[in-house]
Image (cartoon, helix red, strand yellow):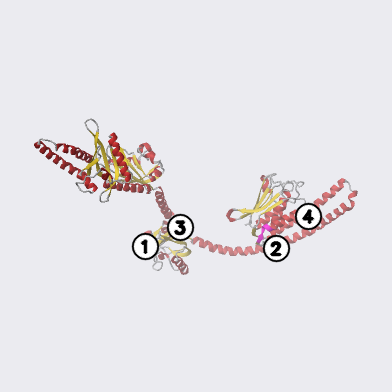
Amino acid sequence: MTTRLRRAGPPARLFHPAALIVAGFLVALWPYRRRMDGQQNAVKVAADHQCLRTSEAILDNAATVCHVGAWQVVLPAMYITWSRELCVILEVAPAHQPSLDEAMAYYPPTDRRVLGAALADCAATGLAFTLELRLVTAKQRPLLVKVVGQAVRDSVGVITHIQGALQDISVSRTAELDQLRVANRLLTTLETISDGVVTLDAECRFTYVNATAERLLQRKRDVLLGQSLVDVFPLGLDASLERHCHTALRTRQTLHFEDFYNPLGLWLDVRVYPSDEGLAVYFFDVTQRRAERAELALLKTAIARINDIVLITEAEPIDAPGPCIVFVNDAFERRTGYSRAEVLGKSPRMLQGPRTSRDELNRIREALAAGQPVRAEVVNYTKAGGEYWQELDISSITDASGRRTHFVAVQRDVTERRAAVEEIVRLNRDLEHRVNQRTAQLEAVNKELQAFSASVSHDLRGPLTALEGFSALLAKREAANFSDKGVHYLNRIRTSVAQMGGLIDGLLALASAASEPLVRVPVDLSALSHRMASECLERNADHHAVFHIAEGMTANADALLMSVVLHNLISNACKFSAKTPQPVVTVGCQPGAVGQQVYFVQDNGAGFDEAAAGNLFGLFQRLHNPSDFAGTGIGLANVKRAVERHGGTVWAKGQVGAGATFYFTLG
């Protein structure tokens, strides 16, 4: 226990003032009692002794009631005397008068040193003292005591003795500590609860604010304490809280209300409790709860108004007579002709009839018994006996413990849809017949187109081959006889023949991409890209492009058409980056929309103006001068046709002088 020393001050609150008065009188009477022993007047002595005994009896009784013991240390002899009540406190014999050392021995060493220093100080300077000390009685019972002492001077001001009192404060201090512990527990509780708690005095000034109140009021407690509601919130929290607080103070009635407070943007549930000291205000945020209530009301209204039938039943019994209906919406009444009063408490089986499928009902029962949602289509009957087809979605509702409590069924009238389906089936039969006819016609056209392509290839390639051959002979044998202009003309002829051959190959490839059947197989696009890149470098020995090809690219596609796509895109990338000092061609893929893969071929070559990007994939469309980059204008048209055969799309992005990127998907 901590020892505290206070000098020249009044006793602490726990030391009763009457106890000090009693102790003072007891100490003061002892010298007077000794002086009276020497008086010569027997009558006066007897009277004084009687008066003294009466006073001592009164003071002894007062000391016993207050549980205060008196003591006196005579200076300079340093011997001590004490009162009968002090003997009771120390649990010694009533007539026991110890030496000062014996009296000091009741205190533990630390407290003994403190008391000794206080006595020495008081004897030397006259400085009064008040101490709280530990003490062990003669029966080894520990106590906490309050000891006060003051110097007594003679007529010339010399300190002749020190007198004082001792009070056992163990019980009161224990009670005080118990109260403190209770207060601390209460404070801890208030600081941890989810409610905001504040206390207000009679002037509506904050005297306590807990942590939750700080958060909800959006103010720190050191700002709130001592301030009034009006000072802290000029609008008085919409003036509502202030008004209710004054009402509670005036009427002494507990108030409970909900209100919206604009300064906080919250709905608060508030309870105001008046007391003699002021008000205790408990509040918590119900914004979410009110929103949920409003949402529930809106949901109920929406369910009542929607066109689909909503029907809720109890969960048991699944077997006959079946669960009882507890809710139906307006759409149920409109479609069936039954009112709510006619169906509540009855089984949905009342809606079934002769053409209701028993197999479908058994399937529904098995799913519900297993706790699984189910969808079904059945025939039900109106109150008037009319049939209608209904699509049902039924699921179970469970409580917090997972126990099934209800079934909710959303029912859609599909009578018209069923009639439309039957009509569609009939039309599909007719359509299938027409499609078969059209397919046969297309197959005939394709065969004619293939025959035409073969004829074009044969009929055009013959003259071109002759032109190429004879022009090569002329260049070899007669070049020396030609003028420079003649050689130029001959080279122009050979270039045109090569270009015509490329056009024929491109047109045949275009026809093949449009007419050949699509056969989807797993295709390793990474390996195919490596092969196309190698062929490109072999065809152009002077090309020094660096290829970056992503590994692991695969697709479920037609292998031949993928060769057409990658051949044209990689060849174009090589061609249009040939004049770049450090050409780089990248082939890769990236995630696209709806889980699709987007493949791309990118170069850092000549690029193009994106304003003309719409012409890239047209037949014979070119964005560059043929003298700069040779080509037929058919390659990208073939790419577009091959990609679209797969159900995909192709597009491009570029910038003049900064390269181009061609993207495609495969459906």
**Mark 4: amino acid:** Gly
Which residue corresponds to mark 2?
A: 444
Identify whether 276 is placed above or below 430: above
Q: Secondary structure at mark 1?
A: loop
| Label pair 3/2, CB-CB below 8 angstroms | no
The numbered mark at residue 345 is: 1
- Amino acid identity at mark 2: Ala
Q: Which residue is mark 3?
A: 308
Sequence-earlier tag: 3 or 1: 3
Which one is nearer the viewer's eye here, 509 or 20?
20
The residue at the point 51 percent across, 62 percent down is 418
How far is disc 2 from disc 4 in space, using C-alphas?
28 Å
Query: Outermost residue toward the top?
Result: 156
The earlier-in-sequence mark between 2 and 4 is 2
Q: Percent position (x, y) of residue 394?
A: 45, 62
- Distance between the alpha carbons at the discs numbered 3 and 4: 67 Å
Distance between the Cα atoms at labels 3 and 2? 51 Å
Tell me the kind of residue under disc 3. Asp
The C terminus: image quadrant: bottom right
To which quarter of the image does residue 523 belong?
bottom right
Indicate left or right for 245 with 87 as reference: right
Task: Answer few, some or many: residues within 10 Å of disc 4's Cα (few below 14, many 20 plus, some between 14 and 19).
Answer: some
The span shown in magenta is 522-527
Q: Which residue is mark 4?
A: 501
Q: Residues at badges 3 and 1 in contact (C-beta under 8 Å)? A: no
